[in-house]
Structures are given as structure tokens and as C-alpha cells.
Amino acid sequence: MTVLKLDRDPDPEFDNEPDTGLGLIDCSRCGFRGRGISLCHCPTCHLTFTSITGFDDHRTGGHADDSRRCRTPEQIKERGYDTNDAGYWRRPMTGQLDHWKK
Ligand SMILES: [Zn+2]
Ligand SMILES: [Zn+2]
């Protein structure tokens, strides 16, 4: 079994990314458009994550018995994730939790 696991530095702030076409997400199914080198948009539940780590973490179940599925937003929150100002899921640093609350 092959698991794609990229452990790059989580740096979710790509607001000033030059227009290179890299990392452009254009989901025809939910209409989401976003840009970010490490941005991950789930084609199943259409949540957007600021890193592959968060994306991986919201998937659960096994490949072997085909029980692979997405966690619900409630379950994702229980794992310490929250949305940032752009609505992307990320895991706030300890001590910055209040910053991400509206
Ligand atoms: Zn999903
Ligand atoms: Zn989508």
C-alpha cells in the first residue's frame, strides 16, 4: 500500500503568491476557486485545507475494505482544526486559538 505523505513546512499564507498557475484549485463541482501551493481541496466533501497534512487527517477508514471516507467538520474540529479567515481548515498553533475565532 502506498501512502502519499508530504511533510513540508506548514505555511498556509499564500495571499501574495504570484500568478503562476501553480496551486490553482478550480472545483467544477462546488464552484470553489482558490490558490495556494499546499492548498488541498477535497473532491469528496469539498472542504479546503491549508496543507496536505490536514487533508490527510480528515480522511479516515481503510483502503483495504474500501471504508475510506471524510470526517465531518465536527469531527475535524475535535481533532484540533479550525477554519481561518478564508474558510480553510488548519490546525491553529497553541495559544493562537482565540485569533481564529470570530
Ligand atoms: Zn473530504
Ligand atoms: Zn469542490
Image (tube, rainbow, N blue to C red):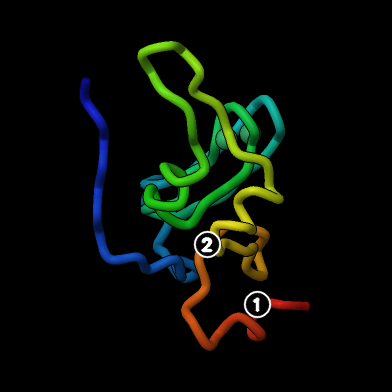
Q: Is mark 1 on a helix, strand or loop?
A: helix
Q: Compared with residue 100, is residue 22 higher up or lower down, i.e. above or below?
A: above
**Tags 1 and 2 in contact by the CB under 8 Å rule?**
yes
Q: Is mark 2 on a helix, strand or loop?
A: strand
Counting from the top left corner in percent of width and height, residue 11 is at 37, 68
Query: In terms of image quarters, where does ligand 2 lie?
Result: top right
* Residue in the picture at 49% in, 23% down: 68
Task: Report how far apart the C-alphas of labels 1 and 2 lie in the structure.
Answer: 10 Å
The label number, if any, that marks residue 90 in the structure image:
2
Quarter of the image where one finds residue 101: bottom right
26 relative position to 36: left or right: right
Residue under label 1: 100
* Residue in the picture at 52% in, 43% down: 58
Residue found farthest to the top: 65
The label number, if any, that marks residue 53 in the structure image:
none
Q: Label 1 amino acid?
A: Trp
Counting from the top left corner in percent of width and height, residue 3 is at 25, 31
